[in-house]
Amino acid sequence: MAQISLRDVSHDNWRATLGLTVHPEQQRFIADYVPIAAIALAKAYIRPGGLLWLPFAIYADQQLVGFIELACEPDSRQRYWVYHFFIDQAYQGKGYGKAALDAFAQTVQARYPRCQQINLTVHPENTSAQHVYTSVGFRPTGAEQDGEPVYTLQLVDRSKSD
């Protein structure tokens, strides 16, 4: 399999992220607007909820294959959220989603060693995504946010060893 990496969305790749798409029936699971990356990039500027929003482009080797955004409160231990995560429709089914989530968790831990958990919500009908999330260690919490179940990935607290 190709090497999966995350890159900050920057002046070099932001336009390319706007071209990423999902199958039409998946759109409602990711964002209310097209292109998906446009709303995510706007959130990075606007900072809804007072959170820091960091968009990442997902690459398989040198090919742009997806998008994911972190919304966080950097000094917290638990306010780290996945938003707008998707693999472009042309690259789905190749294991990139799981690898991207692993890379995302590693990136969050490296940048924010106080982080103890990463959270996300998933549309209740998006069983494919639920399977991917649980396969990498996310677990449903029983809570809901905006009508969607909340899933959490517990991380090792590395700040105690710093």
Image (cartoon, rainbow, N blue to C red):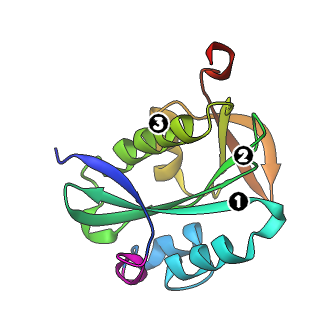
First-in-chain label (2 vs 1): 1
Rendered position, 23 above or below 95: below
Marks 1 and 2: in contact by CB < 8 Å? yes
Write the residue at 34% across / 68% down: 88
| Quarter of the rendering occupied by the N terminus | top left
Residue topped by disc 2: 74
| Quarter of the rendering occupied by the C terminus | top right
Q: Is residue 104 on the magenta stretch? A: no
Could you say which disc has been placed on residue 52 in the image? 1
Q: The magenta stretch spans which residues? A: 11-19
In the image, residue 106 lies at what x, y percent?
Answer: 46, 36
The quadrant where residue 8 appears? bottom left
First-in-chain label (3 vs 1): 1
Write the residue at 67% across / 76% down: 45
Marks 3 and 2: in contact by CB < 8 Å? no
Disc 2 or disc 3, which is closer to the eye? Answer: 2
Mark 2 lies on a secondary structure that is loop
Image position of 63 (left or right of 125): left
Mark 1 lies on a secondary structure that is strand
Q: Name, please, the residue furthest toward the left.
A: 1
Could you say which disc has been placed on residue 106 in the image? 3
Please name the amino acid that badge 3 sits on: Gln
Image position of 68 (left or right of 154): left
User: Mark 2 to mark 1: distance in Å?
Assistant: 7 Å
Most foreground residue, 148 or 57: 57
In the image, residue 57 lies at what x, y percent?
Answer: 40, 63
Q: Is residue 16 on the magenta stretch? A: yes
Please name the amino acid that badge 1 sits on: Leu
Write the residue at 25% across / 70% down: 90
Query: Mark 3, residues whose alpha carbon is within 10 Å: few (<14), some, or many (≥20)?
Result: few
Write the residue at 75% across / 37% down: 78
The quadrant where residue 103 appears? top left
